Image (cartoon, rainbow, N blue to C red):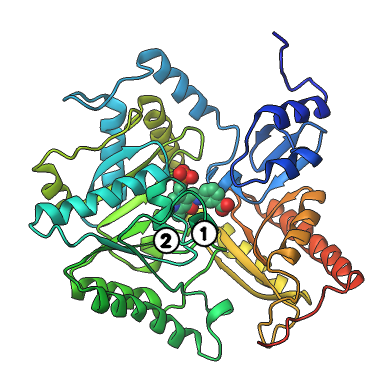
Amino acid sequence: MTLISTNMPTAELQALDTAHHMHPFTNNAELGAKGARIITRADGCWLNDSDGNRILDGMAGLWCVNVGYGRKELVDAAARQMQELPFYNTFFQTSHVPAIALSAKLAELAPGDLNHVFFAGSGSEANDTNLRMVRTYWDLKGKPGKNIVVSRWNAYHGSSVGSGSLGGMKGMHAQGGMPIPDIHHVGQPNWWAEGGDMTPDDFGRMRARELETAIEELGADRVAAFIAEPVQGAGGVIIPPTTYWPEIQRICDAHDILLIADEVICGFGRAGNWFGSQTMGIKPHIMTIAKGLSSGYMPIGGSIVCDEVAEVIGNAEFNHGYTYSGHPVACAVALENLRILEEEQIITRVQQDTGPYLREKFESLTEHPMVGEAQIVGMMGSIALTPDKASRAVFEAEEGTVGYICRERCFANNLIMRHVGDRMIISPPLVISKSEIDTLIERAWKSLDEAYATLRERGLFKARPAA
Ligand code: PXG
């Protein structure tokens, strides 16, 4: 067998990748024609590729490498656990120390009476758990018809059939028979794109009240839960107006609807606190976790569940679980990751030092002729690209064309900064230093300048006429 290694020429690795590897959320034929960028190693906030480039990772992998790359303690925790007990299940009346220790630690960190953890292998699996858990909860309470989950358009909750249905990505719903029945979507609190002439506060209240209207139309005896990310991540880092969450909380309380906060991105310091629910001042019954839980070093997710729901579910057999629910190696790594976050006071630093520094620099990008608004909380931020700031106009070109051009410039300038439509987003490792923040902003500025020049050259810096 040929040994495939990082010593092989990039073109050969790309050819093998094209021949055998199907990439997620990718047109594989198009990617095959140009070849994937091959990442070979990483340390801190920096990636190396197979052509010898050093790339600043402004996305922390995929919103997850919160403590940065190359933390030997996490490697050692995995190795120790693999030697002691590489796998055992948590079904059939057995348990093991890593799952016990991690669930106890999460109960300590989570606010209020969120004291119980159901483990999964990913955020998608955890949201599938949530879907089944809230329906089972109401069933056990004698309300089997209370089974509709309300979510939002442009939400992301995962890619399995259940979690993808909960999400509000229309492109996903168009493939593979989604959404499944009894999921209902309401509008997102994206003032920049959808707020029209309303003030952000009025718009926030209006969008929250769409939940109340939906509950009234469907009937409170039909609605089991509302699920939302405290701050939408994959949808473009959309920070809701300050009026939004208090109104959502009031509506859930008033109509006896369970609130599920999807903390897969916001959790573990990303939004400036242990959980985004704390940043947004909400009290969920269930929180979905994954990503930053292990800083992405091992695949692990889960649901942190409040006393009341856990008690009701716990008094029956919940016919649900995954082979890797509470995987010992993943739990051991997650536990060590939480220790690092806590002992090195990484979240405090984000709150008090590097977060405010990043905010100031990031908001200065609005001085660029193409940047309308900048939104940032903790270490997740976005800028809206626009041909006309005052009217919040969209580009005449198809949505995403300009964002893609900008992203390509970032890529060429060795900065990973993603685009979602015509928004550019960042989510760097929480350990990013001030000088690395300076580099990130310099490269973003340079990429914006280059994209702007390209748009001018190609006649693309043009607003779409009002409909
Ligand atoms: N909930 C949220 C809020 C997420 O962001 C998931 C659930 C699903 O987690 P898993 O571990 O099953 O992927 C996510 C995942 C993007 C992107 O393009 C975002 C995610 C995944 C893949 C791509 O921003 N978030």
Task: State the residue at coordinates (57%, 46%).
Answer: 62
Instruction: Tell me residue 235's x, y (percent).
Output: 54, 62
Q: Position of residue 196 (x, y in %)?
A: 56, 87
> Are there few (<14), some (14-19), or many (20+) residues within 10 Å of tag 2?
many
The N terminus sits in image quarter: top right
- In the rendered structure, the answer to whether residue 286 lies left or right of residue 185 reads left
Q: Could you tell me which quadrant the C terminus lies in?
A: bottom right
The x, y position of residue 280, in whole percent, is 39, 68
In terms of image quadrants, where is residue 3?
Answer: top right
Describe residue 141's horizontal placement relative to residue 334 as left or right.
left
- List the single residue furthest toward the right: 457
Any atom of ligand 1 within 8 Å of the CB at mark 1?
A: yes
Q: Residue at x 69, y 64 (%)?
A: 400
Image point (68%, 68%), residue name: 399
User: As drawn, which residue projects farthest toward the top?
Assistant: 1
Q: Secondary structure at mark 2?
A: loop
Give the amino acid at mark 2.
Glu
**Is 394 drawn above or below residue 78 in the view shown?**
below
Q: Would you say 358 lies left or right of 337 here?
A: right
Percent of width and height locating residue 239:
50, 70
Q: Which residue is tagged 1? A: 233
Q: Are marks 1 and 2 in contact (CB under 8 Å)?
A: yes
Q: Is disc 2's CB within 8 Å of ligand 1? A: yes
Closer to the camera in the image, 220 or 327: 220
Distance from Cα at disc 1 to Cα at disc 2? 8 Å
- What residue sits 43% from the left and 41% below the top? 343
Residue furthest bottom as drawn: 197
Q: Secondary structure at mark 1?
A: loop
Q: Which mark is on residue 229? A: 2
Task: Count up the numbered dots.
Answer: 2
Residue type at mark 1 is Gly
